[in-house]
Amino acid sequence: LKESSYYCIQVRDAQLDRGPAASLVLDRLVHSRVSPIDPTFLGYSYLRIYAGATEAAVAAKTSPSLLFVGGGAYGFPRYVEATYPTASITVVEIDPQVTAISRQLLGLRPDSRVQSVHQDARAFLIGQTADQSYDVVYGDAYSDLSTPYHLTTLEYDRLVYQALRDDGVYMANVIDDYEHGELLRAFVATVRAVFSHTYLVRQGKFTGTQAETAVVIGTKRPLDLASRARPSEGMVVVADEELQQYLAAGRQILLTDDYAPVDQLTAPLFLQRERIVDAPR
C-alpha cells in the first residue's frame, strides 16, 4: 500500500492459468490487471477492443506513433511495445508513483521503449508543436468512479484532434450503466461534435443496470472496424442506426469547459458501487 499525491495505490497478486498476474488498485478501483511476465496478456475486454481497433488504425503503418493518456499498470503500452516493435510509444501519466510501481512490480522493463511523461495530459497536448503528431491517442485516465472532467470536453477533444495525423484515431474507454447512465451518451455526443466519424464498440450486449466499459472511437477518416471485430471475445461495433437510436433515447449533453457535470452523469454508478468495483472490463 502506497499513498501518492493522487491515489492510494495497491498491488494485489493473483494466479492465472498462464502464470502469475497482478492487479493495480487506484483508490477503490481495480484499474488494471496485468501479467508481469507476459506483455501480450490483456486482462480486460476493453483492452481487447483496443487491440482490434489498433490493428485497423495502424495496419498500413511501418512505425506508428502512439500516445497514451493515463498509464495505470502500463498493460496496453507493454502490449503494443511487444506487438509493434517499431512503434513510438509515449505515456502521459500524471502520477510518477504509478509509473514507479509499474516498473518495480508490474513488468515495465527498465529498457522499455515506452517513454513516460509525468504531466497533466491536457497541459501536455497544449505544449505539442506542429511537427509532433500521433497515429493513435488512447484515453484511459480513470480515478475511482470518476473521469477528470477536463479530459472529456469539446475543447479537450479538439486538442486531441489537432495532435492526430490526417488518418489518426482517438479511442477512449468509458464506464457507465448503459440503460440509466448518462456519461457514455454525453461522451459520444461530444466526440461526434469534433470528429468526422464516431464509433461505439461494446463487449456483447449491455443489459439491465450492469455497468460495463465501452470504447468510443473518433476518427478523421472512415475506419474499417468491422473486419477487426472479434465476436468470439464479445467485440461488437454498434451499427450507425442503433447508435443514433441510443443517442436519441436520452439527453445528448455537450461537455464543455464551462459545463461538464461528469460527477452528476455518473451518479447511477454510485448506486451500484460494489458492482462497479468488479465491473466487466
Image (cartoon, rainbow, N blue to C red):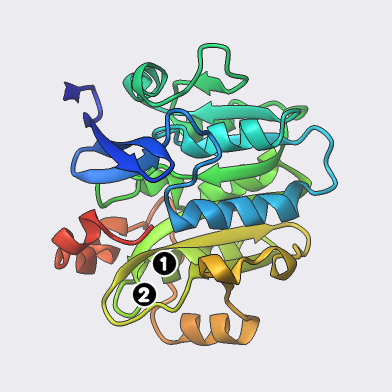
How many C-alpha atoms fall within 10 Å of the one at disc 1: few (<14), some, or many (≥20)?
many
Residue 97: image x %, image y %? 32, 19
Name the N-terminal-most of marks 2 and 1.
Answer: 2
Q: Residue at image x 22%, y 64%? A: 269
In terms of image quadrants, where is residue 90?
Answer: top right
Residue 52 image point, x, y percent: 64, 56
Q: Nearer the viewer, residue 40 or 170?
A: 40
Q: Secondary structure at mark 1?
A: helix
Q: Quadrant of residue 162?
A: top right
176 with respect to 54 (left or right): left
Which x, y percent locates residue 38? 50, 33
Residue 135 lies, with reference to residue 234, above or below; the image says above
Q: Residue at x 18, y 44 (%)?
A: 28
User: What kind of residue is marked 1?
Assistant: Leu
Does residue 189 show up?
Answer: no
Q: Amino acid at mark 2?
A: Tyr
